[in-house]
Image (cartoon, rainbow, N blue to C red):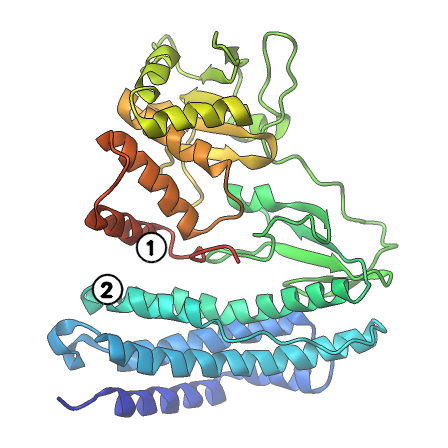
Amino acid sequence: MVDMAPELLQQIQSDWSDNLKDDAEIKSLIEKINEGKATYKEVEDLSYRVGKDLSKSLLDNITEDILPNGHVPQNVAEKILHPTLNNAHNLVTNVAIKVQSDMNSAAEIGLRAQKTDYDKDRAQGLVHKLTNGQFEDTKWILDEPVTLFVQSVADNTLKKNVDFQAHSGLKPQIIRKASSKCCDWCEDLEGTYDYGSEPKDVYRRHERCKCSVDYNPGTGKRQDVWSKAWHEDAEKDKIKERVQKSINREADSLTGNIGKKLEEKIAWKNNLKKLSTENNVFYTVDERANKSETVSIKDIIKDLNRTEVGRDTISLINTKKPEIILCYGINNKDEKGNVLYGKIYPDTKTILIFADETKNLKKTSETIIHEVYHLTQEGSSRKNEVQCKIREKKHEKNSTQLTRKEIKDIIKETNRDYWYLPWRDD
């Protein structure tokens, strides 16, 4: 069988080169960069355009009619995606290094700009997704995920330079500001952090994320991590203190209120009702009118005690002492309209269980098992989600082990639903 990859790769690279040359926005950005007037705003804009132009070239040339059985073979995907993504990485890296060098000079920082390595693991993840099914079902990988891969080169370069400056004796602060109408995930990351105390996700973004991240290198100036504009610290509009984004109890001895920020957001009017349990970790809040609760804490504890993973969850609850709130009549959709079963606020060890959606004892217990285990993890990754889902499945089966197929199915489902997360936190 003739290898289709070389000829296809050549055509894609030729079209991509033409797209880049014809891209008026890229021409304008390169001109500004060459003049030494650019910031990381231009690097980010350029990385976005490079990613979009590459995506278009891939989708224009890889079509169902040229593929054997409508499927992209593994070797073809590897021979096409790795070279093109690596070329995009090098293009954005070269621009980012020039801009970082110019900004270091402007800030009187006598350090060499640092570059990042090609993220082969992430690229291989795109290869896996593209080949894991019929092309009509997987071709979306060549769209936004490819663009996000190229955009990440700019963000990773910034992170590496912040790390390098900190290790060189500067004391940068990282300041993340959520954009208007942003999602809960971004709101939870908003804040000002001394270097070393920042969340692992502070540099990360999801699809169409417009948040900004500043860093203060300790020279009297700070630089926006994504829009990258330099600002003087003496400005009148200094960054405000971190707004508490997680649930903040303002409790007296028996009752508590949902924190003001969250209360405004979802319009909770009622006080929490503390349920009588040994460790006083379960609460309920109900915004419905005259409706009974679908599950009881007593039944949840009983159900958890019937399996090994459930008993381990009770042990974690006793150790971590989170606040687990069963929510009724509360909006439980994320920014994309996806329905959530649960949500965790690690900073305050608060777990929301959306009981309207879990509906029955089985799903409620599994969701508690899932969210409680997140308290033992750091960062956000697909591997973390897989571990939580495995624990759910073990409780469902009342088993200490899963079959290889069950684990593979969980990984496949997680890769589909959380494709924008890295596989693991390095």
Dots 2, 1 in contact, CB < 8 A: yes
> Can residue 354 be seen from the camera position used here?
no
Residue placed at 39% from the left, 13% from the top? 297
Q: Residues within 10 Å of mark 2 (few under 14, many from 20)?
A: some
What separation in Å lies between label 2 and label 1 (alpha carbons)? 11 Å
Q: Amino acid at mark 1?
A: Asn
Q: Is residue 148 left or right of residue 294?
A: right
> Can residue 320 be seen from the camera position used here?
yes
Where residue 344 appears, as percent x and y from the top left, is: 49, 34
Q: Is residue 163 left or right of residue 393?
A: right
Where residue 241 appears, as percent x and y from the top left, is: 75, 41
Q: Up-down: is 21 above or below 409?
A: below
Which quarter of the rendering shows the N terminus? Answer: bottom left
Local secondary structure at mark 2: loop
Q: Is residue 26 left or right of residue 86?
A: right
Residue placed at 43% from the left, 20% from the top? 326
Q: Amino acid at mark 2?
A: Asn
Where residue 400 appears, as percent x and y from the top left, is: 28, 35
For marks 2 and 1, the one nearer the N-term is: 2
Q: Residues within 10 Å of mark 1 (few under 14, many from 20)?
A: many
Residue placed at 30% from the left, 52% from the top? 411
- Quarter of the image where one finds residue 246: top right
Q: Is residue 10 left or right of residue 96?
A: left
- Quarter of the image where one finds residue 321: top right
Nearer to me, 265 or 4: 4
- The residue pinned by badge 1 equals 415
Q: Looking at the rendered structure, which numbered label has been put on residue 132?
A: 2
Q: Up-down: is 92 above or below 154?
A: below
